[in-house]
Image (spheres, rainbow, N blue to C red):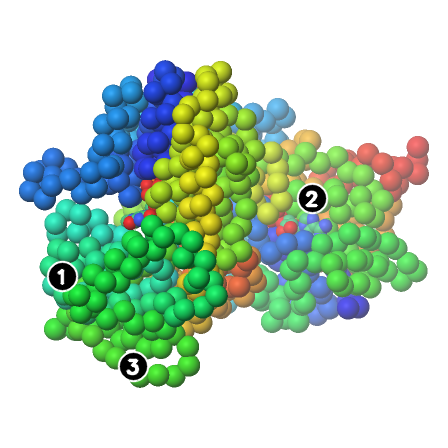
Amino acid sequence: MSVTADVLVIGAGVLGASTGFELARRGHRVAVVDRGSVSREGSGTTAGNLHVQAVHTRRPGQDVPLDARRFLPLQKAASDLWEAVPDLLGIDIELVRTGGFTVAETAEQLQELKLKGEWEREFGVQTVLMDQDTVHDALPALGPTVLGATWCAEDGYANPLLVTPAYLNAARRSGAQITPHAPVTALSRDHNGWRADAGATQLHVGAVVDTAGPWLADVAALAGVVLAMAPLTIQMHATTRMPPLLRNLVQHIGEGLSIKQVTSGTILIGGGWPSGPIAAGSRTASSMASLMGNIAQAVRILPVLGQMRLLRSWAGPLAATPDEMPVVGAVPGLDDFYLAGGTYAFTFAPLWAQTLADLVEGKQPPVDLSGLGPDRLVIEGGDHGQEH
Amino acid sequence: MTSDVVIVGAGPAGLSAATVIAENDRSVVVIDEQPRPGGQYYRQQSAAVIATHGVHRAEGAALIERARRAGVQFRSGVSVWGVDDDRRTLLVSAADGTSIRRHLAPRIVVATGATERALPFPGWQLPAVTTVGYAQHLCAEGVRVGARVLVAGSGPFLLSVACSLVGVGVDVVAVLEEGTPYRPRAAGWKVAGHPQRLREFAAYRARLAAARVPVRSGRRVVSAEETADGLRVVEGPTVGTGRARQHTVDALNVGFGFRPQIDLLRLLGCGTRIDALSGDEVAVVDVDGATDLDGVWAAGEVTGIAGAPSALAEGLVVGAAVLRSLGAPLPEGLAAARRDVSRARAFASTLGRLYPAPRDLAALAAASLGDDALVCRCESVSAGQVRAAQFGGTDLQAVKAATRAGMGLCQGRECAPAVSALCGSPTAAFTVRPPLRPILLAAVAEHAAQVI
Ligand SMILES: Cc1cc2nc3c(=O)[nH]c(=O)nc-3n(C[C@H](O)[C@H](O)[C@H](O)COP(=O)(O)OP(=O)(O)OC[C@H]3O[C@@H](n4cnc5c(N)ncnc54)[C@H](O)[C@@H]3O)c2cc1C
Ligand SMILES: Cc1cc2nc3c(=O)[nH]c(=O)nc-3n(C[C@H](O)[C@H](O)[C@H](O)COP(=O)(O)OP(=O)(O)OC[C@H]3O[C@@H](n4cnc5c(N)ncnc54)[C@H](O)[C@@H]3O)c2cc1C
């Protein structure tokens, strides 16, 4: 089958889905393809947290800390955009914004909370620093090791299993063509656009958007540019369903930890603990060491969890960069080729969708992208390759 | 806790492997989550029940006694829920998910048996609907599942359970078999090559005939519904049109055969294959029961459904292979056990061909379901929701993600065949992940404090 479109979006995770929707509703003819089923990789395994207050800087085992201050204007912009997402998609995506705590257990971590509070004020993110008594009054379930916390009323979460399909459905309603089980295996440039092989389909398109998540660099390589990416896998844990007992997101400033109770009643525990070697199809094995580490830490912070039952763990792939920062922008040396990915892509989905659509249209993106472009990751090909 | 060999599963396969290993002076621990050894076929009743009703299967009790005398150490009421240290350690907990322990396991025999295959129909979630296996276990304890009972589904096990029900005084109104296995045809003659099993079969039929229990082939349950008088069950023809009948009973016992319980094998990382007739995942083993992983063997129904005699013989074959890996001489009876295995497997596959393939049964069940019928009972997911899973396609995992079917307490053990049939998936196997059983978070935290 042969298809002509304005834009080909490669990868039907949350970024491909939201970008496909954004482009389609702006009137572009869009084709979204995925190698496998939609929403099965990072976006089908994510914790689904909307991080608005500054994030902790290291996952367990992470070498390079991320630049939490650089994240803040992006988080603020994404947070504002999320408000409109349920109405835009027209279905209940179980978006809950009941706020979140980031806890500290040491004097050093309390210092970090203060510093992060200064950054948050600088970028207009509202947070409240709470001392030990205040935070235990606010959330009596916290364990005795918690010495303080910051509270952010805009933190929240949505159900990722609903979000990406909802974006794809909305994109389809706006005229986008969604094709699962169509791996892109070849990309070539001709005088008026890009040619792509995607499974049984040959596409001829004006522009390419690469949102292949952990395989972002593999897709760019098909176009001749070698990018340095450092994909990895992380793990989640779920309890059996419980009656409502936790309304807020709970995170940790010094360690990878996130805890919340989702609409089904299940309590989800994550925080970026590493799992087994990366494998497509979400078949990456869970790690027992991470399971134990993450659960022990969660029970320490919220002892009430001890009486709950762990039902399930799972693992998913993440498109991390060597500097742990997101990557978004035009690929140097390639015409009409854009990409977005990297950590916290769930939170950033509505923002990266607008950004990519603006870039495709030659407009000014909604946020300052300096330092986030793919240029910093180019090893070979594109402009960089020509220079050498 | 260390031993030369750890066996998971104290059914016929695990028991016979343990016995031959211990009788050849190697140390062996048998872990089973049931309160007493025996597995499904040799399930042992509590002392109180035995005092009133006698021993249910004496040969099982004798085998357990022989294993004990040989020095087999049983750890009953203990579940294996995880694997650690690059597969050298099994993580176990009390069956209620508390108090975690580690078992060093240089050699593992996985003999985790099978579970009953469940298929949905409108009303299958009602409390008066149980599996045939559950009814059978109640019979062994002298308990009647109801005064008037209908037995339905497919497979030879229905006859055996109906006889047990009759034996405890239940009025079995009928046995409905979805296939037509009892009509003579070419495949049927091969069964004649197994006179002993054939006699067993004939005895069931004779017993039911004597109790005037009709066995109706080509008939299935259309629906079940609670009424003031009891459970109203509508039966109809499996194919085509035919007279519907109604029964009012205390209980409906349904069974569609067994599915290998491969969860532990999968967690260990052993190779499996999809059985074409059932869509179920089955262990891949060689003639000695060795898996593709060093030091891991599998025996019994986990390698494919072939009945208790096969499980017993396989246990001996695997026990011999384990002994060889420990440098022990070959035990007696090995050649005979190998012959028994191949005979039992041949019988099972001939018998299997007389009955409808499980995949066809699941497909029929799925196709007959109205959109509002429940498919996943844990998460209350209807057939319509599975059908409407727009982007799931035939990918079982994607349909699970889209609908929550299979995410509940049973982790898809119950609904996998039906959900896979509804979405046209070639496999009925959800991804296996730790914990294999729900486990208390406090127990994990306490254990982590000891090992990390
Ligand atoms: C366990 C876990 C927890 C997380 N928690 C959070 C969180 O709480 N908050 C947050 O903001 N972020 C979180 N993240 C990160 C974030 O969720 C993910 O980064 C995000 O969902 C990734 O979306 P994506 O669209 O970039 O990539 P993906 O969802 O991974 O999608 C990429 C798609 O590209 C497809 N693809 C690959 N190669 C090809 C090809 N050649 N042709 C066609 N298609 C191809 C893949 O099949 C896949 O579907 C988490 C991630 C994980 C794994
Ligand atoms: C209710 C019922 C009745 C049956 N009746 C008959 C019959 O009459 N005739 C016949 O031929 N077959 C019958 N079967 C089939 C039966 O499964 C086999 O014939 C026989 O029991 C198989 O032996 P096995 O050793 O492979 O497994 P099983 O006897 O099934 O033993 C497996 C054991 O492993 C244990 N186990 C599994 N996973 C774990 C874990 N993670 N941790 C700890 N322990 C674990 C289980 O508790 C179980 O005791 C019946 C099955 C069922 C379910």
Q: Nearer the viewer, residue B335 or B385?
A: B335
Q: Nearer the viewer, residue B144 or A31?
A: B144
Q: Position of A348 compared to B36: left or right? A: right
> Of the residues shown, which amino acid type is indicated by label 3?
Ala
Q: Position of B341 compared to B274: left or right? A: left
Q: Nearer the viewer, residue A68 or B285?
A: B285
Residue depicted at 42% across the width and 23% down the height: B331
Residue B129 shows in this picture:
no
Q: Which residue is mark 1?
A: B170
Residue depicted at 17% across the width and 65% down the height: B210
The spot of residue B244 in percent (x, y) is: 29, 81
The spot of residue A48 in percent (x, y) is: 49, 47
Q: Which residue is mark 2?
A: A215
Whether disc 2's CB lies below 8 Å from ligand 1 is answered: yes
Kindly identify which numbered label has been placed on residue B262: none
Q: Check if mark 1 and mark 2 are on a common chain.
A: no
Question: Chain letter of disc 2?
Answer: A
Residue B160 occupies quadrant: bottom left
Tell me the element at label 3.
loop
Mark 3 or 1, closer to the camera: 1
Q: Is residue B154 above or below residue A254?
A: below
The spot of residue A350 in percent (x, y) is: 59, 54
> Of the residues shown, which amino acid type is indicated by label 2?
Trp
Tag 3–tag 2 contact (CB < 8 Å) = no
Residue depicted at 76% across the width and 63% down the height: A201
Q: Which residue is mark 3?
A: B244
Q: Is residue B452 above or below residue A19?
A: above
Residue B142 shows in this picture:
yes
Residue A103 occupies quadrant: top left
